Amino acid sequence: MILGIGFSDPLLVGIIALALLLCLVIVGVRVVFAAAVVGLLGLIELLGWTGAAGIVGTVPHSKSSTYALSVLPMFIFIGFLAFHAGMTRQLFVAARHWLGWLPGGLAVATVLATAGFAAVSGASTATSAVFARVAIPEMLRYGYDKKLAAGVVAAGGTLATLIPPSAIIVIYAIIVEESVGRLLLAGFLPGLFSAVVYGSIIVVWAKFRPEQAPSVPGSSWKERFESLPGVSPVLLVVLIIISAIYGGWATPTEAGALGAAVVFVLALLKGAGVKTIRNSLMESAKLTAMIFALIWGVLIFVRFLGFSGIPEAFTSWIVGLEMSPMMIMIMILLAYAVLGMFMDAIGMLLLTLPVVYPAVIALGFDSIWFGIIVVKMAEVCLITPPIGLNCFVVNAVRPDISLPQVFKGITLFFVADVLTIIGLLMFPEIVTILPDLLN
């Protein structure tokens, strides 16, 4: 017990801890520290100092030594090295040559280019930062509306959460103990579907508001084909990762390591020096350490939740509701939408899944399908105010576009995300067809 309080009901302790954690997050305490401290205090209250120390002391080592987690630094390194080696500008140039003639063609090209970079990055903020430098100046040069230009970059960056390699998908797989390979494959088609919806809504918008998204002069077939060799490194890495996982001849970690090796060699061939490689390694190490620390802190809280009985109580309550499972799922997704306004995507999933996931499975939903749906909700959270991280990144790179303008610019893409989620709810085969082929 703490301070001699001695609550007799573990469930009551769990509810108080959840309320305390929510308050700490709202006032601005980092999720990693809030979760770790509240989880430790809760474990001390339920198990005493000795029991709590025994559990908390083993979490960092036990989770750091999990083989599935080793895929994260590989995927992160691929993204940073591809960025520092300058492999991103060629993606945008090729997309502009092939799609620039469409209504809103440069914005559509930006979506396609961000999807391509997402396939080697896995980091949404990095994708948004890169294309804020590459795509926004080009769109503004052709007279695009500032808000739309910023919005398409912020929204396009979110595709990195779905299209493999995705750090958030790996984290989901580890939390719910699902196959990393199956989940990575499951994110591929929904990621492309999301990109198609983005592109389609841009074309429709540009038809009615051509002054905000004018077309650019068409490119010759010679220019189009000459732009293709520049995207071959990205296509090669995507082919290696997908074929390795789908073909079963490599684990996700091995596929990530092979992809990183290929990008490393390609970067050297492009003239990358020691500084480029050092910067890529340092940024990869920093982001990996941040994610690992977040996992450690939240898992301390998750251990406490297990002793409090909160997940079981929530599952029993959800299953007992006199509503259809799909209606309950919609309510859960709406709750995620609200929660995402105040928390970052990874922290939100780490904190909620131990409680929500058992209830979702008890309702009969597929684990892979729910994983992709909830990761898509995490995408939405990256562009919704007041925490929309990608919007802050775009504003930081382009301070001439104010934060309110960036948030106004994502309105169109928020609608697109809602349509995408409706499509995934109505047609779950978009998610399950590729992983089912592995069976």
Image (spheres, grey):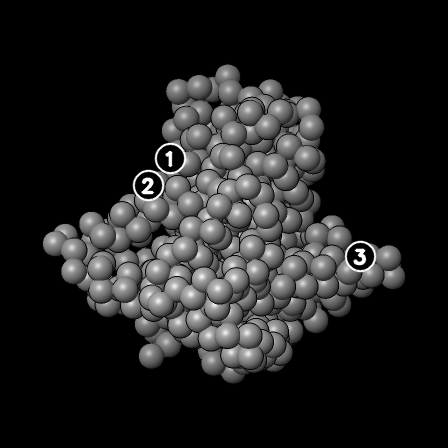
Please name the residue shown 37% across and 76% down the image. Answer: 438
Looking at the image, how many numbered discs can be counted on the residues? Answer: 3
Lower sequence index among marks 1 and 3? 3
Residue annotated with mark 2: 419
Instruction: For residue 194, say whether it is visible.
Output: no
- Furthest-bottom residue in this view: 249
Q: Residue furthest front?
A: 4
Q: Position of residue 362 (x, y in %)?
A: 24, 67
Amino acid identity at mark 2: Leu
Secondary element under disc 3, as helix, strand or loop, is helix
Label 3: few (<14), some or many (≥20) within 10 Å?
A: some
Is disc 1 placed on a helix, strand or loop? helix
- Whole-angstrom CA distance, mark 3 to mark 2, is 39 Å
- Position of residue 241 relative to residue 413, above or below, is below
**Location of mark 3 (residue):** 279
Compared with 127, 57 (above or below) is below
Is the residue 387 above or below the residue 295 in the image?
Answer: above
Q: Is mark 2 on a helix, strand or loop?
A: helix
Residue at image point 62% right, 24% down: 402
Contact flag, marks 2 and 1 (Cβ < 8 Å): yes
Q: Which label sits on residue 415?
A: 1
Q: Which residue is at 60% across, 51% downward?
A: 30
Q: Where is residue 201 in the image (x, y as percent from the top left)?
A: 40, 34
**Spatial separation of the CA atoms under disc 2 and disc 1:** 6 Å
Residue type at mark 1 is Val
Which amino acid, mark 3? Asn
Residue occupying the point 77% across, 60% down: 282
- Front residue of 18/358: it is 18
